[in-house]
Image (cartoon, coloured by chain):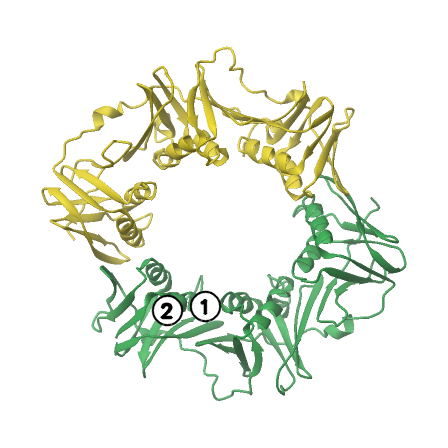
Chain colours: A yellow, B green
Amino acid sequence: MKITCEKSELQKGVNIVSKAVPSTTTMPVLYCILITAKDDKIILLANDMELAIQTELEGTILSEGNVALNAKVFSDIVHKLEDSLVSIEVDENNLLTTITCEKSEFQIGGNDGDEFVDLPDYKEQIASPILISQFTLRELIRQTIFCVATTEMGNKIMMGELFDIKNNELRVIALDGHRVAIRKTALKGDTPDKKLVVPGKTLNEIIKILQSDINSSLDIYYTQNHIIFEFDKTVVVSRLIEGEFFHIDTMLSSDYETKISLNKKNLLKSVERAILLTNEADKKPLVLDIKDEVVEIKLKSAIGELYEELYVSKEGRDLTIGFNAKFVLDALRVIDDEEVTMYMSNSKAPCFIRDEEYNYIYLILPLNFATI
Amino acid sequence: MKITCEKSELQKGVNIVSKAVPSTTTMPVLYCILITAKDDKIILLANDMELAIQTELEGTILSEGNVALNAKVFSDIVHKLEDSLVSIEVDENNLLTTITCEKSEFQIGGNDGDEFVDLPDYKEQIASPILISQFTLRELIRQTIFCVATTEMGNKIMMGELFDIKNNELRVIALDGHRVAIRKTALKGDTPDKKLVVPGKTLNEIIKILQSDINSSLDIYYTQNHIIFEFDKTVVVSRLIEGEFFHIDTMLSSDYETKISLNKKNLLKSVERAILLTNEADKKPLVLDIKDEVVEIKLKSAIGELYEELYVSKEGRDLTIGFNAKFVLDALRVIDDEEVTMYMSNSKAPCFIRDEEYNYIYLILPLNFATI
């Protein structure tokens, strides 16, 4: 194999596929990035068996072939090359790979590309794509991913997000047993209803490579076991999580006894201050004491005590309610509105932070609190 | 005690003195910052018994007194307060401290300020100060500190830098057994000769609080056991390291057999690439093969092999010499000149990277190398 490619193009490609290189694996060849030059296409591929990412490079093929190069070594080298044309040449006898750029010449050992694990075959079973902009998908994920459970806690399905396509709307739903995050967006075109549970790990990686440009489009396909994201010259294929997701709609009630609207930035800053007094071992509740026109914010822990007042516009009954401060903080941080509205029924029932149109819903279970 | 002070002023002061808060100590009160309001001055102090930092705040004293507040908790709180006037009030009976800013009110427990350890008394033994700009001192330290030994390696003196004042010049010298860094600057005024060995830890902290402004001045005083830096409204007092520093001048020779000058940026980038092929366990030498007009740069390790050529202007004999790539990298990174000059005698003698005027000298011992 011999190819040439601009350094910037190579670096961009390596950055993209590196997200699928496993940190630990029992198949050492998967620590590599596979480079394939064939049929006028230069393709990079990485695969951790749950998630595979492939991207195509602009470049010139001087002779076809493939090689698998240690991802860390190859990526480090590419980043440090001069910004110029890079040549990658593999000695077919011993897989010794020479990377040349300007007056630098690296030689590193390669691995047999034929031992690498190819992308799962998804072409045959392909459904008609779900069309969405990269920006929108990135926002949907960013604004919900913090609710995905990070350890199994007895239920693997919580480690994924539900992509719920219904009536040409996509709802993305994450929950961890204490809280729920839901974001929705309208889809273009006529999209069949479908529920897919996508691993949180996949989503965490994919948001790193999606563009923030509203005009960059993306196609989502799926098969029985996989979800496929196609965008630019990149294909991301991830296993789906098997099993049925929680029936979330039964948890969503539009009844409430107390509704408050307040300035998001001020509330966020209050909660950021309150959280200073909590620690991992001692999760004291953030107490909201809601009255007419004012909400008192209180937190008392072994470290100290905070008391604040915020102006609030209130409907309904007075209420005192306690939360895990971090859960409130996480939700507020991903809400872009200037004002947030919270709907509550009593001190033991879930609190909903949502907008009028239900574009976002953050459900947080309250904590017990001693009167402070 | 009751004081008021602008949040920005308080935050600046807390940031400065926090550098002297110990990460571990057998005297728990030293995890605190001492606030003292007395004689029209509001003073913050932290002290880890090696290094003490004191700074004065602009503010208003409503009643005198002192209190010691946990540095981490106090600092976290101050950073998150609104940008407005802050009031700190201590209940003299139980030391409960109330920090109020806008509509936020924190209460945290305080500690008895009288139990805190005051600055070492240095006023009586004071010598006439060494005058230097904060910028110059910061640069001298930054450009040498990487050569200070970080573990004792049998010789505590290597964990400090020599401040060598002689003939109205200050030379700052660090060495770790494999390399030496020397930077010098002319001093204003008539300064008595003196040698002081300042702990590397002190210098690492002080460069974080010095201003980068060439017009910000600083006075250095010393006593038998301490060095004192006075600048702005801040006093830094550090223990000196006892003992005699190495007689470095006997190591400095101006003889050479080979002298090369080359573009610093190109050499730096070459060495950055070469270092990718080394690791902690396997420190293969960076080999320079010096010929007329070209230096070949080579590194061969278990990871791979690099070969580069750089244009060089050479005087004297051809030479092949090997180095620890990191040592060359560290020196090049703090040299601001566009071109660097290296002076060498043979493959076993020290290499000197220095300018014409000896404003800087970086001595690096070569490594043995197998021919590659």
Q: Which chain does the residue under circle 2 lie in? A: B
Left/right of residue B253 with respect to residue B193 in the rendered view: right
Task: Give whichever of discs 1 and 2 has the lower sequence position.
Answer: 2
The residue lying toward the viewer, choosing from B219 and B113, is B219
Q: Visible in this render: residue A324?
A: no
Q: In x, y percent, where is residue A205? A: 48, 33
Decide: is B299 above or below B158.
Answer: above
Query: Alpha carbon of mark 1 to alpha carbon of mark 2: how far?
Result: 18 Å
Please report the residue visible at 28 percent of the width from the left and 45 percent of the height from the top. Answer: A338
Q: In x, y percent, where is residue B232? A: 46, 76
Please report the residue visible at 34 percent of the width from the left and 73 percent of the height from the top. Answer: B35
Instruction: Look at label 1 and name its amino acid.
Output: Ala
The residue lying toward the viewer, choosing from A349 and B369, is A349
Decide: is A124 above or below B136.
Answer: above
Instruction: Look at label 2 and name its amino acid.
Output: Glu
Decide: is A127 above or below A219.
Answer: above
Q: Residue furthest right?
A: B317
Q: Mark 2 points at which residue?
A: B9
Q: In x, y percent, where is residue B72? A: 37, 60
Label 1 in the same subunit as label 2: yes
Q: Residue furthest left?
A: A317
Left/right of residue A251 with respect to residue B277 in the rendered view: left
Q: Which chain does the residue under circle 1 lie in? A: B
Please report the residue visible at 26 percent of the width from the left and 58 percent of the height from the top. Answer: A304
Q: Visible in this render: residue B128?
A: yes
The residue lying toward the viewer, choosing from A157 and A259, is A259
Q: Mark 1 points at which residue?
A: B20
Q: Mark 2: which secondary structure? A: helix
Q: In which quarter of the image is residue A64?
A: top right
User: Mark 1: few, some, or many residues within 10 Å (few <14, many ≥20)?
Assistant: many
Q: In x, y percent, where is residue B102? A: 24, 62
